[in-house]
Amino acid sequence: MTTPTLATLEKALKGDPTAAATQIANELTAGIYRIDALAEQLGFALTSPETEQRVAGTTLFSAVLSDLPNDVLNAKELEFLCTFYTDRLRDHHNVMPAIIAGMSALVRMKNVPGESVTQLLHAFFECTTCQSQTRSDRTQLFDMFKFLTSHFQPELTKMAGDFLYGLINSIDGERDPRNLDIIFNFMPEFISQYPLLHLAEELVEVLACYFPIDFNPSKQDPAAITRDALAEKLTNCLVASEQFAEVTVSLAVEKLQSELLVAKLDSIELLHQAALKFKPAALEPYFPQIWQALKAETFPGSENADVVRNALKALAELLKCAAKEPSISHNHQSIVLGVVLPHLSDMHHRLFPPATAIALMCVSGDAQYAGDKILNTFLIKLQTIELNTTSSSSGGGGNEERIKFYHIMSQVYKLAGLRDALDKLDKSILLPLQDDVIAALRLCEREDFEDKQPEDLELQRAALQVLCKCAPALSESQRALIYKCLVQLISHPHIDLDFKSLTVSLGALQPVELQSNFIDICMRNFDIFSEFIKRKIYTNLLPLMPQIAFTQRILELVMQQAFAANVVEPTRLLALEALSSLLDQEDQRFVVELQQQSNLLHKLIELAQQTQPELSLPSLELIAAALSRIMQHLPLSEQSAIVSEYLPTLQLQLATNLYVAKGLLGYLHKDITLDDHFERLLDDLTKLSLNADNEQLRGIAHRLLCSLVNKMDNNSTNRDHVKRITQRLKAAIKEGDEHAVHALAWIAKGLVVAGFEEAADMVGDLSELLEHPTLSSAAAVAFDVIATEFPELDLPVVKFLYQQKFFQTIMGKLGSKLSKYCEHHVKAFIYVLKATPHSVLKLNIEQLGPLLFTTLDTHNDAHSLCIALGICANFVHHQDEYFQAHLGHIIPSCLELSKQKPPLNMQVRIAALQLLYDITKYPTYLLLPHKVDVTLVLAAALDDPKRLVRNAAVMARNAWYLVGAPTGD
Amino acid sequence: MPTEIENLNPSVYGKIKERQITAKDEDESIVDPFDKREIFDLIRNINDPEHPLSLEELHVVQEELINVSDKQNSVHINFTPTIPHCSMATLIGLSIRVKLLRSLPPRFKVTVEITPGTHASELAVNKQLADKERVAAALENQHLAEVINQCISAKG
């Protein structure tokens, strides 16, 4: 076979060129004929005097080139083709799209010679301009430039200004966001790699005219280019070369003065990026200019919090980058601090808060220089304010200011600490400053400090905060004073100040000192202290536990107090509390080690089971919590061993043993099989639940039952056990036993969550009970139990989407009754709705809506009303359309509910008023017809006897007054 | 809004803490009387017409300058303009009045006056604020209503 015949080609030109091009490309790839033969054969069209014919010919030829794999043609052929296309560039405008397609295919060929590419580009820039092409051709061109800049760097560099000039001309005036996206994508790399010669300014000006980007993407745009993405890329272009610094900075400063929020934010971001990319020396000449611009936004600050935050961030970045060069940094800092420092001395000044914010940014930039200056300002000011012992009686006065200063100082210290500059700060400023803080703390050593209220200790709290942050900078004598003061604080009979973080940081720095000056004293006199002091000692010592120097001593203290035989109840309770919180705060490794070294679990169980003297319920509760905490952290094998060791001996009828069981089983891993004990546990717990009088014990039994059936292995034996228990409970229910309904509800909960089939039957039984003459309200509560989530209850087996499934089951079971609005059914259903995810409710809103509205109109149960109002509020919050269509129904219902009516409580009134407030977010035209009614009726709620209701009424009524009123927005 | 701000750099004071909710507040059977703090909470968040600050922060309204008698159905408020010739005084007073009109039950008689001796044309302003007809007429004025709504539309 040879080249395609004239007739075939003519046919292809008239018909579908793509199909023909693919075929020809395949034949070329297979080597059936060469490209020059094709060109010759196609010559009649390529050089035809008819423009249309030339367009068709060139299109076909370019299509063939784009379909070819990029390694088929050799260098000679490509050179020939490039020359051909170079000549064609002078052709008629209509032929241009086809030529561009061909060029862009050619330059991507593997063997194309560099000189041919430059020749092609020269001709292109000379003969035509990019901007006179259509949008899609320009896209092709920019894609081509992108490819060229990354693959032909040496050749393009050799073209020197010509290529750059051509490129700038091509970009200049581009308006399409899709093309701009391509340009902004490849330009930063190009700019950073190519010499910009004398054209840097032209280039940056072409780019600068897009700043700030103003573009609203259409919603149907498939390319999904967003304004923010474009803005980010443009910013990268503008900071790509240090030669741009002057233009970029003046651009940002100029646009920062704009009224447009977007322009402001973009300019700030540009300055931020400039700080990151440009060297401090490059930016130094423009810093005064930048600072003036940023000052206008931050000092006293614009109203937009985003602008202020970002401007501060940019300033901090500028200062931080400058800090690498001390001389530049000090120049910058003195310019900024010169403005803000004078305003730091009067806290009532309006400029005080922004001055503080800027001062802290200075510290985060150059902690040593700025820290010294700022702390010195505070020192001078603090020396002029007298330390006031009676802060509350004299109306705040000096101490209010001191507290404020301490807060800022602690932040300065913290920042300096983070930048490792704490030890570089000037000691001659730090020491007197720290003396002042210690003096403030030591006020509590004075005798007239006895009758202080907790809220009067604000100064001491602030002082502790500072000391905690400046711990490494404290002198030895200062530390001695602090220890003395801490001992005083901890043994004080009334004051409870939290200084955990101070002891922790001191402990890390000076373990020996802290040991002898503070911990020893606490331990030595521990037994004679009152309960209040003991509790304080525990809270302040436990955080020191992770520090190896103190671990053993503190642990010994806790253990001795918890387990020694001669300890009496309140002390033991405290120690157990401490032990629980210790287990809560420490990590797994610590807990496991503790268990291995001291067999804590065994000790706890023994303690729980001791009979002389018997432990109180709160103590048992703490032991159970500690046990379950330890169990959670132990490896599976140990958990299993412990269960088989202790479980058989437990007699669950005894309160002590029940608590131990709660501790052991509550958080047992779900993979540990309990089959051997399952039957006995079920029996005992059910018996307990039916017979016990103590509500607390029954509650524990219920939770254990729920957790047990949830975790049980899904085999027939276990399910038979559950079935048997269910039968027994049903028999009890027949006799009218309310306890049995509760027990059944908890078992059902465990099964529902785990997705067992039996759950549906149980739920069915419970829903039948809703018609029972005496047990109906208990049955309604049962649905509440099933639906509510209890965070402390461990239900590890969770069926995917069980809430949705449960909702559907209930819908099916109660459907017919619900449509008749039977009271208990509706109540039970509302409980279920509370726990159902919003999306499921939204799907079924057509059926649920009438039910919710009926609930709002029946005023007899506050709890279900609150839930219904909560659900409505959630819908209204999402601006739901169904509710929008039924505003005429909800608004009068809520108005009715907002009036005081026993037996409904204030929560209902508040929720109704809150809902009325939320409704004001709907479009004004929907609300206006109701405005007069609502504002009139709400006047009654303004005189409600409860203040919280009145507050909600004020919010709602004021919001309704603003509906449709002129507000200038 | 005026183009030139009269008091450029006012002193700014701290805000008081939010009212703590006590067990009494939660108890349905106890009646909470209207007190100074409640009235103060109603007006402290009103915005100043000139600055992005609340009346509380500028000490224009203070809790001590409020007198409430729940039994006699009366509320008396004194407010203090930041400077003696403040042209915004009437507007501030009007905002306080309107806010209370919307937030207090109608049984209360509300009096809003300038703290004696703190404003150049104290009597004239007080007279204007006490005149119900004038207050009603002011709210009919589109532009005035807009400014007042802006001032009182802050949270709370």
Image: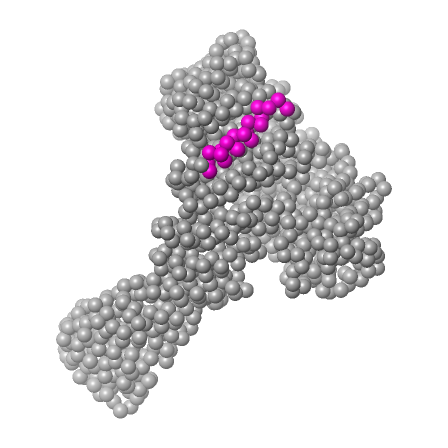
Q: Residue A444 colored magenta?
A: yes
Give x and y (percent) for residue A678: 46, 23
Q: For this rendering, which residue is in front, A146 or A355?
A: A355
State whether the magenta stretch is mostly helix, strand or loop.
Answer: helix
Q: Is residue A490 above or below residue B126?
A: above
Give x and y (percent) for residue A717: 44, 26
Give x and y (percent) for residue A283: 38, 59
Q: Which residue is at the far right?
A: B72
Which residues lie in the magenta part? A429-448
Left or right of A466 on screen, residue A869? right
The quadrant of the rendering that contains the N terminus of chain A is bottom left
Measuring 30% from the left and 63% from the top, which residue is drawn there? A192
> Which corner quadrant of the image does residue A96 belong to?
bottom left
Q: Is residue A160 above or below residue A551?
A: below
Measuring 65% from the left and 64% from the top, which residue is drawn there? B3
Is residue A877 in view? yes
Q: Residue A755 colored magenta?
A: no
